[in-house]
Amino acid sequence: GAGVSQSPSNKVTEKGKDVELRCDPISGHTALYWYRQSLGQGLEFLIYFQGNSAPDKSGLPSDRFSAERTGGSVSTLTIQRTQQEDSAVYLCASSPTPGLDNEQFFGPGTRLTVL
Amino acid sequence: RKEVEQDPGPFNVPEGATVAFNCTYSNSASQSFFWYRQDCRKEPKLLMSVYSSGNEDGRFTAQLNRASQYISLLIRDSKLSDSATYLCVVNMALSGGYNKLIFGAGTRLAVHP
C-alpha cells in the first residue's frame, strides 16, 4: 500500500516569503508528526496531531510556524516570513495510533532552501 | 543535558567486524525504546524495538538497562549495506495518555571492504 507522501519534494524560496508543506499520511493512521532535520543533525520534533487536534505544539520554533490537519488526514505545515535558518528537511511521519509501541512511518521529506 | 545522547561517530569498521553503539536517555519515565536507521538523504526507518529482556533480530542485538538509562545496539558480521546512521529513540509520555518519540542525533557507521 501507499506510504506517507510529502509535497513538494524540494522547495527553494526567497527570505521573507511564506511556504506551505503538505503531508499525506498512511490511510487510517490517526497520529501524525512533523519533524525538522538540519544538515548532519538529528530530528527536531515540531508538532504532533492526534486526529485533527494537536496535543503537543511545543516544538514549533516560533510563531512563524503553524500546522493544521483536516479530516484527520492531510496536514499542512506553514512557515511565514521564511528565514535562512529555516532551511532544512521537513519530515512527516504517521502511526496507526499514538500507542507506546507503534512504529512511526516517515515520508521522504521536503527539502526547504531559503535564499 | 539532551534527552537522548549518542556518540555521533563515525565508526569506521571493516566488513565482518562487530560494532556496538550506545545511547543514554534522561527521562526515567520513558517506557518504549527503538533503534531507527537512516540512510544518507533518506527518511528514518524502524530497525527494531528494544525490550527489557533484550532482543535479537538476525545480526542485530538490542539491550536496555533501565537502572542506568542506557540502550545499546550490537551489529555482528557487518556488511557494506549496514553503512548508515543509527538513531536511538525513546518515548516521552504527554498528558492525556499520548506519547511522542524523542530522537537522538544518531551514530554514523561506515563499513568498508
Image: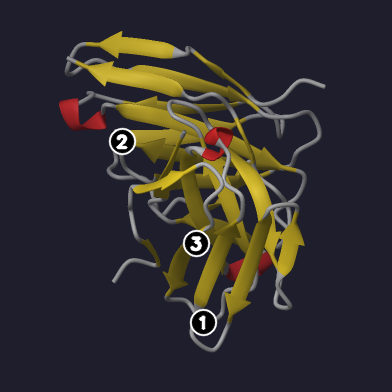
Whether callout 3 and callout 1 share a subunit is answered: yes
Q: Quadrant of the N terminus of chain A?
A: top right
Q: Quadrant of residue A107?
A: top right
Amino acid tagged 2: Ser
Residue B46 location, quadrant: top right
Choose between A79 and B99: the one closer to the eye: B99
Q: Mark 2 — residue?
A: A38
The chain ID associated with circle 3 is B
Q: Which residue is mark 3?
A: B20
Give the foreground label among 3 and 1: 3
Q: Are marks 3 and 1 in contact (CB under 8 Å)?
A: no
Residue A58 relative to residue A75: left or right: left
**Chain to which the residue tagged by mark 1 belongs:** B
Residue on which disc 1 sits: B28
- Secondary element at tag 2: loop
What is the three-letter code of the residue carrying label 1? Ser
Q: Secondary structure at mark 1?
A: loop
Residue A97's place in the image compared with B71, above or below, is above
Which element is circle 3 on? strand
Q: Crowdedness of circle 2 by 10 Å Cα count: few (<14), some, many (20+)?
A: some
Q: What distance separates the C-alpha of mark 2 from that of mark 3?
A: 26 Å
